[in-house]
Amino acid sequence: MSTYKEVKKVTTHTVQDMKLRGEKISMLTAYDYSMAKIFDAAKIDVLLVGDSASNVMHGHETTLPITLDEMISHAAAVIKAVDRALVVVDLPFGSYQGNSKEALVSSIRIMKEAEAHAVKLEGGSEVVESIKRILTAGIPVMGHLGLTPQSIYKFGTYEVRAKEDAEAAKLMEDAKLLEEAGCFALVLEKIPSKLAKEVALAIKIPVIGIGAGPDVDGQVLVSHDMLGINKDFSPKFLRRYLNLYDEIKSAVERYVEDVKSVDFPNEKEQY
Ligand code: KIV
C-alpha cells in the first residue's frame, strides 16, 4: 500500500522514507538548466546528472570519455534550475577507480564546484573502500550494480546482466555490502526482474531500477530516450513518452521553409 506525501525538497532521507511508505521514487537524467527546470516543475523526485551525458550530450559511443570537468559543468547547470529534486551526480570513469583518495577528491569537487547533493558510482566490493571514504566527508553516495556501462569493455555487450547464478549471487552480496558501507540508495541496471525484486526485499535502502522490472522502489530512465530525442536506441525496457526527434525536425523544417520563402518574419514579427 503506497501513500503519497507532498514534499517541498527531496533529500536522501525523503527517498528512504518513500521506500518505507511504499511510495515509488521517480528519477530521470538531466544535463542542462532548461530541461532540469521543466523536470523539477513536473515534480520529479531525483535528477541524475548521469555520465550518459557522454553519449547523449557529447556524442561519444560510450560513457568512458566524459571528464570530471564536463560532469561538473552539467551538474552546476542542473543545480541552478532545481528547487525540489534531489540532484545526484555520476563520478565519471577515471575519477574514482584509482584509489579511495582520488574518489574523495573527485566527489568533493562535484559537491563544491557544482553544489550537488550526492554522488553515484559504479561497482560493488571493488569500490567499497572508496564509498566509505567519500562518506567520511559527509557526501551521500548512491551505488550502481548490474549493467555498469563504465565496464562495457569488460562485459563486451550491453546485454542483461546477472542471468547466471554466480553473477546473481555476487550482485546480491555487493548490494548488501553497499548498504552496509552506507550508500543511501542503489541503482540496478538491466538485470532480471526476479533478482531485482529479491535485492529490493533484502536491503533497506531504496533500489531504483532501469530495465529491472516493477518490483523495486523506483524507476530511472535516460531523459533523451524517454522523450524520443534518440531514435536509434529502443531497448525493451524503454517507454517513450514523446517523439521529440520527429517533432523538432518538423519544426526546424518549417522554420527553414519560412525563412527561405520570406514568410518569416511577418508584419507583426518586426519593429
Ligand atoms: O548515466 C546514466 O544515465 C545512468 C543511468 C542509466 C542510471 O547511470
Image (cartoon, grey):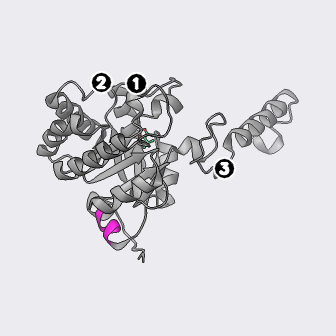
- Local secondary structure at mark 1: loop
Q: Would you place residue 185 above or below residue 92 in this image?
A: below
Snapshot quadrant of residue 145: top left
Q: Which residues are magenta?
A: 16-20
Tell me whether the residue at label 1 lies in contact with that at label 2, contact meaning CB atoms closer than 8 angstroms.
yes
Question: In the drawing, what numbered circle is on residue 242?
Answer: 3
Q: Amino acid at mark 2?
A: Gly
**Residue situated in front as seen by the camera: 256 or 53:** 53
**Quadrant, the C terminus:** top right
Q: Determine crowd level at label 2: few under 14, some 14-19, many 20+ residues with C-alpha closer than 10 A.
A: some
**Front tag of 2 and 3:** 2
Rounded to the nearest angstrom, the CA distance separating label 2 from label 3 is: 34 Å
Question: In the drawing, what numbered circle is on residue 64?
Answer: 1
Query: Which residue carries the number 2 mark?
Result: 94
- Local secondary structure at mark 3: loop
| Ligand 1 lies under 8 Å from the Cβ of mark 3 | no
